[in-house]
Image (spheres, rainbow, N blue to C red):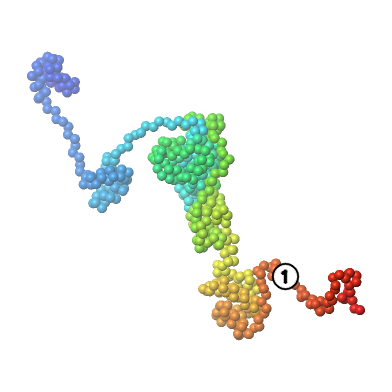
Amino acid sequence: MSAQDPAMQMAEVLRLSLVEGCSIRSIAEQLSISRKRVRKILGRVSIEPKLAPSARPSLLDPYDLKIRGWIEESPDLRTPAVLERLRPLGYTGGVSILRDRLRQLRPRRAHEAFLELDFKPGGAIQVDWADFGFALPGCPRRVSAFVAVLAYSRLIYIEFTLSQKIGSLLRCMERAYAFFGGTTLVDIFDNMKTVVIAGSGATAQFNPTFVEYAKIRGFAIVACNRRSGHEKGRVERPIGFVRTRFWPGRRFSDLLDLNRQATAWREDFANHRVHEVTGKVPSLVHQHEERALLKPLSAAVAETDDIESVPVTKTCRLSFDRNRYSIPWRLVCQSLVVRANDDHVSLWLGRKQVALHTRSWAVGETIVHPSHEQALREERPRVTASYLPPALAGLGETGARYFKLLAANSRSLQREAVRLVFLSELFGEPETAAAMEDVMRTGHVGAEYVEYVMRHKKKLPHLAAPVRLNDPEFDNIHFKEPDLSVYDRPAKTVDPGTPPEEQEDPDHEG
């Protein structure tokens, strides 16, 4: 490089120093110039560092320490909740800049890597619930989908229910095992309350009722850790599959219709498609590889009813699953055991079944058995205003009107009935009915008024009161009057040793 070209010389010195990182000695040797010249060129050019643009002040700056403290205390605190806390402190900004600030302050979760879980044929079933909201027309209960998947073959069982209680879970499990053709070694569950009552994963405490069921069916229970969807991915994906492929656009009249459509979809499509991960048809893998390795169902009967102990109210009702059911009136204020399945509710006192109802899946209904109402009416006439006790049926329409008026008052209907039965037997039913008419014309009701009319006003004679046994078979027995003339004939003592042929005929006149 010629000494007469200073611009090119300066550019080359700068390139070697700033780009190549060469020392002053190296630059001088490469360009055949003195080190003094190199220092002069480098000192002549001043390279100013670029300054970052000054940050604009934010409306959130005065509250930065408060926000940091809240995030450290509750990392999952939502942006709207933080906004609610800032408003009383004077914050006038919007939610957008607050959301950006929280995104900067909130610690980011590191992405985790997972190993793919490997399941052997007949090794495990994964089970979970999915909520589908208030989907049935006219039904005030949420619809839930029970989904069970064989982890190896990916065979799906799906059933929709109106409850996620332990009884509903066990009944769905029974039908799933029947569909699969047996049980597996392990059943894997999310932290549903009917299975896990505390903890999660290795520290989970299981529901004793479900543990007893697992013993009968012969499988081990495994609970997933919280927020670890990868541990039950074989059932998580089918739930999403049901939501996106089966559910959209469906129309159904009731739960039976919904399950009928779900069964058809499961049989015709879900289990016959080529699985996106295995590349195989789940129904074929189950039929040829897995079914033979499932454990056959034991003959032991598993308890799958919903069982509760419920007190009976004074109105002869008990509350179960947000509905009220009638019971025999004699069991008022006792505690009964309720056993319920999908179709019926049975009520038990000890080992004796005292009532059976059709189960209602509505909310707030009262289910009454006709016999319970009738028995209560017979025992408590005040239940209905037009009731006339059977013992006073002979009083006819007058008695019915009388008791209708009587039921609207505070008198004891049972005591009134007992006294009127006595007066009817003493003076006769027609006279008693007539006296009741006289009493009602004066604007009164009451057995004492009826008795006063017959005893003192009409001065009626007493009739012989018949003895009633409250049994028609005995009350309707009539005997003829005995012939007492046989006792007027003369009697003759006969020597016991006299032969019969020598004894005189007492009826012979000699």
Residue at 52% from the left image edge and 56% from the top image edge: 336
Front-most of residues 167 and 133: 167
Q: What residue appears at the point 56 percent right and 38 percent down from the top-left corner?
A: 297
Which residue is label 1 attached to? 477
Which of the 4 quarters of the picture holds residue 178? top right
Q: Residues within 10 Å of mark 1 (few under 14, many from 20)?
A: few
Rendered location of residue 148, percent (x, y): 49, 39
Image position, residue 153 (x, y; %): 50, 32
Q: Residue furthest right?
A: 510
Q: Is residue 445 left or right of residue 29?
A: right
Camera-side residue: 31 or 221?
221
**Is 1 situated above or below 136?**
above
Instruction: Looking at the picture, tell me which residue is in the foreground, 468 or 398.
Output: 468
Please say if 474 is above or below 16: below
- 316 lies above or below 500: above
Looking at the image, residue 217 sits to the left or right of residue 472; the answer is: left
Residue at 58 percent of width and 66 percent of height: 379
Q: Quadrant of the N terminus?
A: top left
Q: Quadrant of the C terminus?
A: bottom right
Residue 451, percent from left and from top:
59, 80
Q: How many marks?
A: 1
Q: What is the x, y in percent for residue 16?
A: 16, 20
